[in-house]
Amino acid sequence: MEAQVEVYRRQYATLRELAGPRSFLVTHRPMWAFGVSKTAGSAGMLFRDNPTLQAASFNEVPSGVEAVLSGHIHIFELLGFVEPRPPQVVVGNSGTELDPAVTTPLEGLEIGNARVAVGETRDAFGFITLEAQGSGWLLTLRDLGGSELRECTIAGLEVACP
């Protein structure tokens, strides 16, 4: 893992130089996400992802990054944090077999040295749209036909899903 951390650490150093205001960090693997283990003997066990990226980034992203947008885990998940950190958006529900549903309430859980303030998750096929809304974003989770399932706002580092 340490060799991978060093490779990613150099990439995060470049990111700090290049990221400007209103940036998104787009990665295949999320920096911070929860999932349910599919391995035998651990049914229902919640895992936290991704220790390699967390170590490489020191759990920090440049101040201009407004959200981390990822896939890899085959569900939808949105995490807003108590500590000053951009939200993590996982959109892995668009193309292959879904991962098991996360039924554990995520609010209050710790991941990557931060506590979850807002945790939304869905295990249904669909996609999201992100629309600029003032200085923030309107995130809409949609089903396969485009109908709205859930709306959330991202404003600065704050996430709200009324």
Image (cartoon, rainbow, N blue to C red):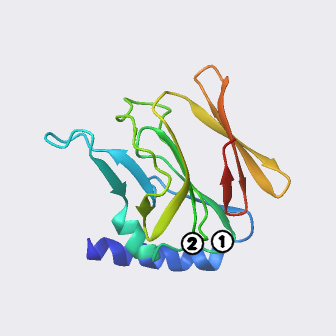
Residue identifier under label 2? 61
Q: Which is more toward the observer, 97 or 76? A: 76
Question: Which residue lies most toward the top here?
Answer: 145
Picture layout, residue 19 above or below residue 138? below
- How many numbered marks does the figure carry? 2
Question: The residue under label 1 is which amino acid type?
Answer: Ala
The quadrant of the image that shows the N terminus is bottom left
Q: Which is more toward the observer, 38 or 29? A: 38
Question: Is residue 29 visible to the viewer in this orientation of the structure?
Answer: no
Q: Which is more toward the observer, 95 or 37? A: 37
Kindly state the secondary structure of the residue where label 1 is placed.
loop
For residue 39, what is the image quadrant?
top left
Question: Is residue 86 visible to the viewer in this orientation of the structure?
Answer: yes
x, y (%) of residue 142? 63, 29
Residue identifier under label 1? 19
The quadrant of the image that shows the C terminus is top right
Kindly state the secondary structure of the residue where label 2 is placed.
loop
Q: CA distance from mark 1 to mark 2?
A: 9 Å
On the rendered structure, is 18 left or right of 43?
right
